[in-house]
Image (cartoon, rainbow, N blue to C red):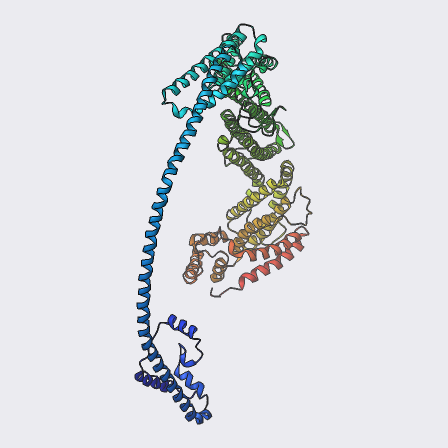
Amino acid sequence: MLLNDASSYELGADQQQQHEVVQLAPDIESQVSTVLAVKDPLDGQDFDPVIYINALFPNEQSLSTVDTVLTKLKAKIRNLDQEIRDLVRSQTDAGGQMRAELEATKKSMQELFARIKLIKEKAKQSEEMVHEITKDIKSLDHAKKNLATSITVLKRLQILVSALDQLRVVGSRKQYTEAAQVLQVVVQLLQHFRSYRAVRQIAVLCESATTIQSELKRQIFNDFDAGFVGGNLRSQLKQLSDACLVIEVLEGDAKRQLVEWYTDFLLKDYRNIFRNSTDVGGLDNVSRRYAWLKRILKTYDDEHSQIFPMSWNVAEALCDKFCLETKKDLESVLIKLGATVDTKIMLQALQQTIDFESKLGMRFGSRVGEEVGTPIVDFDGGVTPVNSKFSKAISSGFEASLVYYIESEDRVLAGMIDSYKAKSEEEEGIYTSSTDLFYFYRQSLVQCAKLSTRKPFLEMCRMFGKWLKAYADILQAKLPKDDGRSRTVTDDELRIICFVINTGDYCTSTTSQLEEKLHEKIDLEFKAQVNFDKEREALLSVTSNGIKALVRALESVCDGPLNSVPRQSWSAVDAVGDQSKFVSQVASALGPCASGVRQALGSAKFYRSFCDKFAESILAKWHTTIYKCKPISEIGAEQMLLDTQGLRNVLVDMANIGSDLSAQTQPPAPYLKILAKGVTRIEQLLKVVMSPHDPPEGLVHNYMLLFNDASVPNFQKVLDLKGLKRADQQAVIEVFQQRVALGPSAGSSGFAQSTGNHSNAAAGHSTGSSAASASASSASTKAQHQFQQFTKFVSGGMGMGKGRNI
């Protein structure tokens, strides 16, 4: 570039001194540039003189044209100055012109306002003129309207007077068909005269109409009384039927009163027969009540239905009242009986009532104002329309007394549970008492759902939960107690434990199904209160405790061989041979027991769970047993390593018992992980025991590498296990303390639990140890030779870090 920053600055400063530049806001500058379509760089908002000059003179050769460029720029400046002067002059002239135009505009607006005012005045004058013209016409219109209304009222009044006279005549003659027609006209006319009640003559006519209607109503009720009570019904059927037409037109609630009179008349005999007689009105005669109504309905269908219009639903009203009174009667009977009620008779009466309600529902359909829904099939095969108004119309009166039925069921269950404590029959791996219990539950559920799905059903659900918990306690009691003492377990005891596990699992799954079924049956408002979580937890606890009992039982089988291990002198072992005798004893003892357990357990998942827990427990017990064997020599530790692999193989074989897997197939990965974790803990301990204590740095290094434990007491336990005397231990402990002070990775997680950081090494060692264990079944010399090679491999691995700072 031809101009540097300094020259650019000086040039800009000079120009600023010569011209005072007006700065506009950036958005205004942008809008101006858009309107003026700025293309010249000199007009740009972000004009930079340096860039502009460099564009004019891009190189040294272009400086030769500087005079030409200056001439053009000066000419351009002159043109711009001329344009500015012209614009200034034009703006000066425009100011005067604008003032003149403004004055002209003001004058025009004044003239416009004057014209508008004149138009308003003329419009007002026109409005007044029109009002004067139409004033007389409006008065004539009002007069015409009032005259037409008066004529209409007089005509209606004339018709009303005539209709009242005619109604009085046809009413006295009991011509009810004509009376109904005339009465309908009278009622309609009276609606028009409601606003004229203040007129005395109109008020007199309205009172007269009310009196005539009252007389008609009393006369018709007397006719019904004479027809039904006097025994003249057959001869008066037509007359009474016509009278119902009048009743339907009468103002007020005459129709309701007539229907109530009719139902009370029919139910009078019902009250006399069943309410005043303790024998006939008892629960055992409920069917006679319903038979009585059936006969009455037949009489209504054959004779009385001709009298009442179908739209009155008289038969349905009769059944409504019958159900209401029957419910009160039965509630009274049940209250008197109280706890002495015979539940069998009560349930029979309730079932008859439900059947009766179902038949009423089929006859009359849905509730008033609702459409009949799709029929549903009841438990006993009956069909009841959805939304039937007669559903629970009488049977709801039994609900308060169903508590006695629930109590009777509770007593039956109590007897069943007591019998389950004594007998222990099994079938297909579970106790038959569990299937009997749930079969009884199913029967009770179906029976109670027929009777009620409200609070009594909820009480039954709670009763189910109570006895499920009691049954779980019975199963728990069949398991052997964990008193901490080792004892010999029999095959029968193992089989009982397995049956308890199977039965607990069956009860758990069936309880969930039972809960779902109860939720389906019970009313929505009680559904949230049906919950068997506590009962399921109790049954799951039975299953879990059963597996723990199995583990303890098979541990007791292994106690004898394991207890013999500390009695051996492990410090005197001078050579590694075949696996120790106790391993073979454990395998011999476990084999038949594990096979029996696998056969008795109904589900493979429980056997897998048992194997997981047993493997973890027996390896922990072997780990504890090792600490009882002090002192242990390095060769003794090597022998224990071999025995550990032997135990692992026994546990692998135990997991494959009863499965379709071949002997060479590995058990599931989670089980192998449990074995690896337990075996690794033991191998880490034995590797440290195998490490020589001289020099002490090697022993300390191996201990820290395997356990990363800074606890002196824990380290001292290992030294005791190696058989070091207290005097010899002091020097090793001092090296250990120095190592802990220097090592950044020294921790405090007890070595007996530390296994997580060496899983890869443990897995590799397990593979090598498996080969050694497999060869242990051959001749002793061959096993010893192979194990010596394995020992060299282990010793070499531990010696790699000797003398190295960690």
Left or right position of 57 against 495: left
Q: Nearer the viewer, residue 648 or 382?
A: 382
Residue 514 against residue 805 in the figure, above or below: above
Residue 783, picture quadrant: bottom right
Relative to the observer, which residue lies in front, 577 or 217?
217
Q: Which x, y percent locates residue 125?
A: 33, 49
Q: Residue at x 47, y 13 (%)?
A: 168
Determine if residue 602 is in view. yes
Q: Residue furthest top?
A: 230
Check the image and name the residue furthest to the bottom.
64
Q: Quadrant of the N terminus?
A: bottom left
Confirm whether residue 320 shows in the render: no
Q: Judge whether 723 appears above or below 75 on screen.
A: above
Return the x and y of residue 278 as percentages of the image width and height.
51, 8
Residue 787 sits above or below residue 434 on the image: below
Residue 89, relative to residue 723: is it above or below? below
Q: Position of residue 49 (x, y in %)?
A: 39, 83
Q: Quadrant of residue 158?
A: top left
Camera-nearest residue between 723 and 7: 7
Q: How many marks?
A: 0
Residue 743, how many percent across, how many down?
Answer: 43, 62
- Left of 3 or right of it: where is 331? right
Nearer to the camera, 130 or 65: 130
